[in-house]
Amino acid sequence: MNKSQSHNQSHDTSADREPDFQPTEEDTLIFIGKLLLLTQDTEHQISWVLRVVFKDGLLTAGDFVRKDKKTLGQLVRTIRENMQVEKSFEGLLVAFVEQRNLFIHELRYQKWFNLESQKNINRVWAALGRYMHNLEQVALTFTAYRTRFAEDIKTPKNEHWHKLEVSGFLPHLRDVYYPKLGYALTPKRKP
């Protein structure tokens, strides 16, 4: 291979690169489905953390497996009533509840929700992306509370735990989210 051929192979041509991702209607509906599942998981995480990590009193086996019938709004109200909530985290929770309610109950009826053109689909993705960002922040915060709790009580580590460690997920939680846990939510002192 001569110098000229080597130089040409090291540079992409626009024909060699994949075009920018342009979501389709099908991609959008798949994204909505995945966001729905992530939303449900996050609500379960919040409920579990309130029942177990922040329980005042003796933990029972039922605390670990019981399903709450409270809505997300009721769970957040419980947080605000029983916890000191750091101001920016409270703002995140309030925004998340509003976005979640719109996503679950009103998405189809938003003026911007239209999948009939690429421009409209991109607008939908932008709106869903804003929701996903807040959803992720709330989910990872409550996952960190749950994970730190498991570490604090010295839960035996299984293969799944090892995979999360090796993947970098657990180190990320420890580095980015654990430091916030001491002040994001703290139980109110009882008089």
Image (spheres, rainbow, N blue to C red):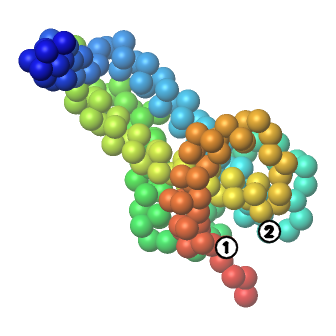
Q: In this view of the protein, which residue sits in the foreground, 180 or 101?
A: 180
Q: Quadrant of the C terminus?
A: bottom right
Q: Position of residue 126 (x, y in %)?
A: 27, 35
Q: In this view of the protein, which residue sits in the foreground, 102 or 11?
A: 11
- Name the disc covering residue 56, or none: 2
Question: Do we see residue 71 in this rendering?
Answer: no
Q: In the rendered structure, which amino acid carries the disc numbered 1?
A: Pro
First reached walking from the N terminus: tag 2 or tag 1: 2
- Name the disc covering residue 187, or none: 1
Instruction: Specify the farthest residue to the left.
Output: 4
Query: What residue is drawn where x is 85% and y is 48%?
Result: 156
Secondary structure beneath dot 2 equals loop
Q: Quadrant of the N terminus?
A: top left
Q: What is the CA distance from the residue labelled 2 to the residue labelled 1?
A: 9 Å
Question: Do we see residue 183 in this rendering?
Answer: yes
Query: What residue is drawn where x is 54% and y is 60%?
Result: 175
Q: Is residue 179 above or below residue 64?
A: below
Q: Position of residue 115 (x, y in %)?
A: 26, 17
Q: In this view of the protein, which residue sits in the foreground, 111 or 170?
A: 170
